[in-house]
Amino acid sequence: MEFFSTIDTPSGNAPAAELARALAPAPTSARSSAATRAPSPAWPPASATVVSAPSAASSSSSVVPVFTADEIRLLQDPIPFSQYGDMHERALRYMRWRRDDAARQEPEIAPTVEMASDARLMRFLVAKAFDCPAAAEMYIGALRWRREAGIDELRAGLLAANAPFFTQGSSCLQALGVHARDDALMAVHPRTFTRPAPDGGHELLRDRHGNLLYIECPGLIVAAEVIALGAAEYTAAAHTSQELLQLILDELSRRAGRLVLVLRVVDMNEVRLVKLMQSRQEKEGERLVKEAGKPFADAYPTTTYKNFLINLPAAAGVAAPLIKAVVPARSAKKVVLLGSKFTEELHKEATPRM
């Protein structure tokens, strides 16, 4: 078996590259179909927000949908957008009404085109198990956070830097960041979801199902360099990285006609599982990393297909706290815990290159 040997990782992060060699890029058929497909409709201007006139708060829109346990189970099943039925529409209609009502009352949080889309609204509904009022509150909270954190400005730069991907149906990104701090983040917190494309740019890594493949090596985080980057710079770079990831999922979902998710592979090699073994500097770096990512679970919900935690120690007792530390509680059931012999299980999801 021959594995691909090039990947977008900062120089010196050999473990991330070694892990990536065991995983395949997007299937050839998927890449070729993307290349021959008609170009995507032009993406709205980077500064665009929802500009349509607010819809009337009709009784049908404002009525809170209530679903039985059996209906919720059906709603939670991932299906193509084209197969959405009356229950999906009732839930979405309520979310649209709450979205428009919030934008009328607080014009400063008016959502961008992507954030206003039905696909993004559906992610909040799924996250809250179709408790529609709870999903709407979560969504509105995310809009407020985006304004406070300046996320829409980061979005504008990312769309402009990757216009061919977002407007012309390209299969590759042109830029993974828009600021020097974004490159610095990659150096101090190794992760990747691309590999260098033959003709330049960054080719997305995909699993067998078309989900985005994301590889992360938290054991390679250099605490001193995280601290040296500074809380403000690290946080801004982390926000940029997460926003780009979500924009990619939006575009891939639009192309696929379904919600595309992330297969996350977290290499736990070199991660200190016992807090008492951490130095003061390591604890401070870990705190900064966690603080920067704390809003992501509520601002970017329903993105996880599966979380593979690999190279775990043999001690079974670390599993529960490890899951709690690495993934949101609602995603814990999607976690697969593996030791050093992970390739067979992982290759069930990500195609090895023969």
Image (cartoon, rainbow, N blue to C red):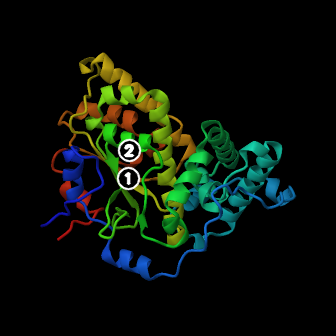
Image position of 53 (left or right of 226):
right
- Pick whichever of labels 2 and 1 is earlier in the sequence: 2
Q: Quadrant of the C terminus?
A: bottom left
Percent across and percent down for residue 118 are 65, 61
Percent across and percent down for residue 187 are 32, 40
CA distance separating discs 2 and 1: 27 Å
Above or below: residue 313 compared with residue 162: above
> Tag 2, which secondary structure?
helix
Image position of 38 (left or right of 196):
right
**Res. 183 mark:** 2
> Tag 1, which secondary structure?
strand
Residue lying at 42% horizontally and 78% vertically, measured from the top left:
35
Image position of 269 (left or right of 234):
left
Residue lying at 19% horizontally and 58% vertically, measured from the top left:
344
Residue type at mark 2: give it.
Answer: Asp
> Disc 1 marks which residue?
306
Percent across and percent down for residue 36 are 44, 83
